[in-house]
Image (cartoon, rainbow, N blue to C red):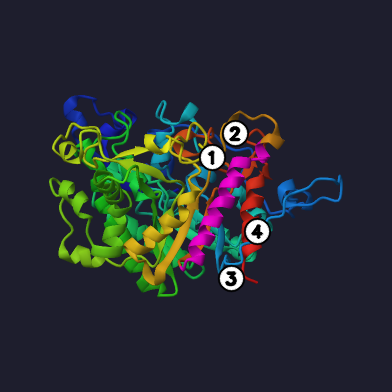
Amino acid sequence: MARYLLPALLSSCVVAQNVIGTATTNSALSKTTSLELSVDDLWDVLVGPVAVANITTIVEATPIPTSSLIPPPNLASYSFPNGRQIPEMVLNSSWSFPKDFWLGVAGAAYQIEGAVKDDGRGPSIWDKLTRVPGYTVANQTGDIADNNYYFYKQDIARIAAMGINTYSFSISWSRIYPFGAGPINQAGIDHYNDVINTCLAYNVTPTVTLFHWDLPLFLQEKYGGWLSEDIVDDFVAYANTSFQAFGDRVKTWFTLNEPIVFCDDYPLPDQYFKNFSIPYKQQPYYCGRNAVLAHAKAYRLGKSLLGNDTLISFKNNGGYKIPLTNSSADAQAVQRAYDYNEGWFADPIFLTGTWPDSLNDYLSTFLEPFTSDEQTLIKGTADLFAHDAYTSQFYYAPDVGIEACLNDTTNSLYPGCFNTSYTYSTADGGWLIGAAADANAPWLHKATDWVPALLHYINDTWAPPLGRILVSEFGFAEPFEVYKTIVADVLTDQIRSDYYKAYMEGILIALSEGLNIMGSLAWSFVDNLEWADGYTVKFGMQRVDFDSPSLDRSYKASFFQYVDVFKQYIQQ
């Protein structure tokens, strides 16, 4: 059992104070001490009991029954009964996927693995967040999730049986470093070695994300996680260990998943996490500065270790931003929206080494600018533009105007000073931009009409190396799926199926217009813990029976639809 001797903040947990016999006075709360902590101590003191799955040993893959690979009726003709007629769809002769297109699926460690305490894994912030009352729906946790930690062989066999050629997954940082730094957990290395080797055995290309939001809890308690510059060296050390262990077989790496999102999670909930002395409104931007530096240093290290044959980037996110009207104010709002979202990370890494001007106008009031050496370090640290692009929406200026908003720090839209809508303007009928997803994912609509425009915007604005663009996540939450009790109703996920068909056709349009779209990674290959939404929002292309001991998987119609578009248009 690994143990770690580091300063521990007494105010982070009353239990810790009682363990060492310190009085819980205000003066005591400001003091620090040194505690020798085991991984079990971290769980006991900072998290508490966890649920355990019925199956806690690795399950070998079994052959996928032919009966589970029969496409839904709209994609197949059956010998009996006859009489059904489907209008013939003529293929577009100008469309094709290149032979090396990545037809992929994606998942993330905390959302699918379960086995949170097994084999020496340390707790992450999400093990604690899911225990903050009300933070997740019904306080659902990732303790068991899909139990992919023990079912990964079967999961990989199932996606390979569908014709998937790429699997994007993340490594749990705290499986490799239970404390975020210090002792390495060899069991974690061994696990991901076997995941990678299993992918290769099934001719599925593994792509790996180093950080998909599950920050080791100890680093958050120690120095505030991404709020502290200390995170940079700890992340680079973790990246180094991963590159060295897996880089001989993994040829595409993503350092960070959606820093826009995980930085916006700061501040973490009061009374459950220690509050570090950065004003709440500024915390996301301290996180963002450190995230850019951590990515850049990890990229430079990875390229030096693995060479130019390995692709390294990060995963940005956001949809196409459409001006609600043709006014100059709405056009300005759109630009500010890009600056405060994608541009926050894409501009430093792909263009300038520093932030967009409108963002910098705000950040310069409290945040140290990147030095000239840091700008040189940052600029050019991505080999492709990986973008998680689920939807699109309209943007427009605040009612009071952008200038008035910028001069009023109490305005709810400050400092971005742009507004959003999912409906066309009143003059255009006020129609919804596209079919709405599940009510618990109000941000998501089937706005697939705008996929080509978004891909062109990325190419024209950030000019990734060799024009490489990867749709690194996209997917849809079928409305009210959690309430459906008939299995066939769940598996016949028509809106999600339509979404994947239209989205892939959008990519085909972009390819036909000369863009270099490397591939698509659909989210997600199974129903899983959707963070704060728990298991109530379903993005999976496979149903998971969470009531069965073996958490049985079943293919949904959308999985067949996703693959079918690819099969129709892949170059022979």
Q: Residue at x 67, y 59 (%)?
A: 90
Label drawn at residue 160: 4
Residue where numbered disc 3 is placed: 99
The magenta region covers: 490-514
Whichever of callouts 4 and 2 sits on the residue coming sooner in the sequence is 4
Q: Are marks 2 and 1 in contact (CB under 8 Å)?
A: yes
Q: Residue 303 or 115: which is nearer the viewer?
A: 303
Q: Residue furthest bottom?
A: 308
Q: Mark 1: few, some, or many residues within 10 Å (few <14, many ≥20)?
A: many
Q: Earlier in the sequence, mark 1 or mark 3?
A: 3
- Residue at 44% in and 52% down: 388
Q: Give the mark nearest the N terminus, 3 or 2.
A: 3
Image height of 106 relative to 467, above or below: above
SS at badge 2: helix
Rendered location of residue 22, percent (x, y): 25, 29
**In the rendering, at what x and y percent does residue 250 appear?**
49, 66
